[in-house]
Image (cartoon, rainbow, N blue to C red):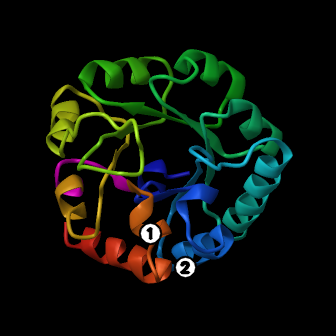
Amino acid sequence: MNLKKLLKLYFIMGSTNCERDPRDVLREAIDGGVTFFQFREKGKGSLTGEAKREFARELQEICGENDVPFIVNDDVDLALQLDADGVHVGQDDEAVEQVREKIGSKILGVSAHNVEEAVEAVNKGADYIGVGPMFSTETKADAREVQGPRIIEELREAGIRLPIVGIGGIQASNVTQVIKAGAEGVSVISAISYASDPKQSAQEFIDKMKES
């Protein structure tokens, strides 16, 4: 598995991030070039229990049919129940080393906001690092202060060699800034999930990244 290539266009979505059927949105986004997917079922009105599990399973099947890795945000138990490809955790979620112990060789992504957090994530078993927010975003109500692409350059200067994915407020219009700063890819929620044409939106990201 070439994780650096797979992380190029990393789509994150849950049922609350769409105005249309999320299954259709995911299919269209993958048709447009999405290479990695994270199931993130959070926020007001999000699914829980068996409904969440069944929804996740349906999205996982779509990913499986298209050879797109399926990652679960934060919920390690769900990831193990579904035999997902991996888990992504933030700084306020379960400790990285504990998650690594539970999931074994599955993919482990960790959110970091500075060099110290990134170095710790590397040392404790992360496979890739999500860094942000790159730009202002309204998807997360508790989003941290905007870092800008410069933080990616700082991580590279500090010797971080793991794949890095930029996240937060990324649009096709600013994606090249993130790639040029040293990221392998970008994580996108609303720019694709709310797009009237998710396939076209994903294609625009891919086309712009080719210019980087």
Q: Residue at x 33, y 71 (%)?
A: 205
Residue 35 location (% of width, % of height): 50, 63
Which of the 4 quarters of the picture holds residue 130? top left
Q: Is residue 66 visible?
A: no
How packed mark 2 is, by other alpha carbons closer than 10 Å (few <14, some 14-19, many 20 or more), is some
Q: State left or right for residue 145 relative to residue 164.
A: left
Query: What are the residue bounds of the magenta stretch?
Result: 179-186
**Regarding mark 1 in the picture, which secondary structure is present there?**
helix
Q: Amino acid at mark 2?
A: Asp
- Above or below residue 63? Residue 50 is above
| Quadrant of residue 121 within the rendered picture | top left
The residue drawn where x is 68% and y is 70% is 23
Q: Are marks 2 and 1 in contact (CB under 8 Å)?
A: no
Residue 173, horizontal then vertical, whole percent: 21, 69
Viewer-closest of 157 and 94: 94
180 in magenta: yes
Q: Is residue 212 left or right of residue 19?
A: left
User: In this image, 63 relative to 183: left or right?
Assistant: right
Q: Earlier in the sequence, mark 2 or mark 1?
A: 2
Q: Which residue is mark 2?
A: 31
Q: Nearer the viewer, residue 132 or 185?
A: 132
Q: In which quadrant of the rendered view does residue 153 lie?
A: top left
Q: Circle 2 sits in a helix, a strand or a loop, which is it?
A: helix
Q: Is residue 10 visible?
A: yes
Q: Which residue is mark 1?
A: 192
Count of picture labels: 2
Observer-side mark, 2 or 1, equals 1
**Nearest the camera: 171 or 136?**
136
How far separated are the C-alphas under marks 2 and 1?
Answer: 12 Å
**Is 76 inside the magenta-drawn segment?**
no
